Amino acid sequence: MRTAASPASLSSPASGSSSRARRVASSGTVSKQPTPRASRSTPSSNPRSTPSKRKAEPAAENPEPSPSRTPKRRRTTVTEDELQARAKRLKDAEKDLRLRQAEVKKREAAANKKHKALDYTEQTLSREHGDVLERRKTLLVKTRAVDAQIKGLQLQRKTLDARERALNRQAERQSVVGMSANGTLNPTRALDMLEEHHTCSLCYEIMACPYTLTAGQCGHSFCAFCILQWSFAAVHRGCGYWHDPLECPLCRAELPYTSDTTPRSVFSFPFTPNRLADGMIKTLVAIVKDTKPDGVPATGSGACPSAGASEDKGTGASMTSERLAPWREGGAMYNDWASRDSRGRTEMTRLATQWPTLQAEGFLEFKDRLAVAQ
């Protein structure tokens, strides 16, 4: 039987080494002794004895300590080394961790410092933004005030321009009509202006509803009824159209040719109303028409004749009254002018309305209505 190892032998390595040395010495001594049986026999001659010898030889040559104690010592030694290595690694890891913690703290402090700097910059920008907004509001208020002043000045300018135009028109009217110094309308001067500047070259009367020819080199004005009679006199009764372009009675400028195809363009209409001359003629005729028999206008602030006026002026006043009498309300000159004005305005409006679609029969009807002999 195998005896258990004593505690002393397990605890003291010196005793173990000495016993191991004795075993090795005894094994070496045993191996050196000759074994005549083994020398005489060969493996080939005695094959059955060979395995047993091979099994016995390792036990005799290599005496090993008891397997129940040696692995425990090896495992204990390996575990202690591993523990020491692990403890060293832990110390190194702790040292590295402390270094990393210190670096993280430094970075955190730097980040906090940058964050504070950013907060300060943000606060500064916020204050500056508030100042900019306040300045913008102030500028907007000032801009609105300036715009209001500009609008007020523009309105004042428009008012002044309107007053200036009114004064200019009044001055022109006074110069054309012949107002006296105290603002009284002068009917004699009005009649003179009518006869000098607004006489028709076809009938040699005061123009009634004046129309202008649309030739590029012309622009002469005539009574509406007179120019219609003159133009429709050239219409041939056989075809109902004009064979040749019309010409101005004064300057012989050619008018646009009237085509026989319909619809015609409204721009081919050869007559244009002279509204400025028409308004001026109506104003002057009204001044003359409203004159009293004594030569004083019916409306106005005319001054009464002076008490010390000489008797030789009575003849001139009577001549003026006789000259203005036909132009008063119900006079022959005024009735003739009003009739020509109404008839010419009516016929010209009808022709302008029917011009795009007017055929030969329509032109002949106009010719007969205008009492043109040819």
Image (cartoon, rainbow, N blue to C red):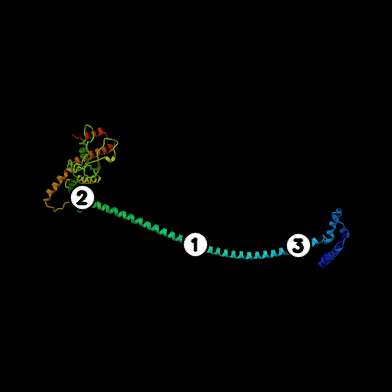
Q: Secondary structure at mark 1?
A: helix
The three-letter amino acid code for the residue at tag 1 is Leu
In the image, residue 28 lies at what x, y percent? Answer: 84, 64
Frontmost residue, 229 versus 356: 356
| Mark 2, residue position | 176
Q: Are marks 2 and 3 in contact (CB under 8 Å)?
A: no
Q: Is residue 349 left or right of residue 95?
A: left
Residue 164 appears anywhere in the view = yes
Looking at the rendered image, the quarter that the N terminus falls into is: bottom right
In the image, residue 330 lies at what x, y percent? Answer: 19, 41
Q: Is residue 204 above or below residue 130?
A: above
Q: Residue at x 42, y 59 (%)?
A: 139
Frontmost residue, 179 versus 22: 22
| Mark 1, residue position | 125
Earlier sequence position, callout 2 versus callout 3:
3
Frontmost residue, 258 versus 204: 258
| Mark 3, residue position | 78
Q: Residue at x 45, y 61 (%)?
A: 132
In the image, residue 129 lies at what x, y percent? Answer: 48, 61
Q: Secondary structure at mark 2?
A: helix
Q: CA distance from mark 2 to mark 3?
A: 138 Å
Residue positioned most to the top: 238
The three-letter amino acid code for the residue at tag 3 is Val
Q: Which mark is drawn over residue 268?
A: none
Nearer the camera: disc 1 or disc 3: 3
Neighbor class of circle 1 (other Cα within 10 Å; few <14, some 14-19, many 20+) is few
In the image, residue 278 lies at what x, y percent? Answer: 23, 44
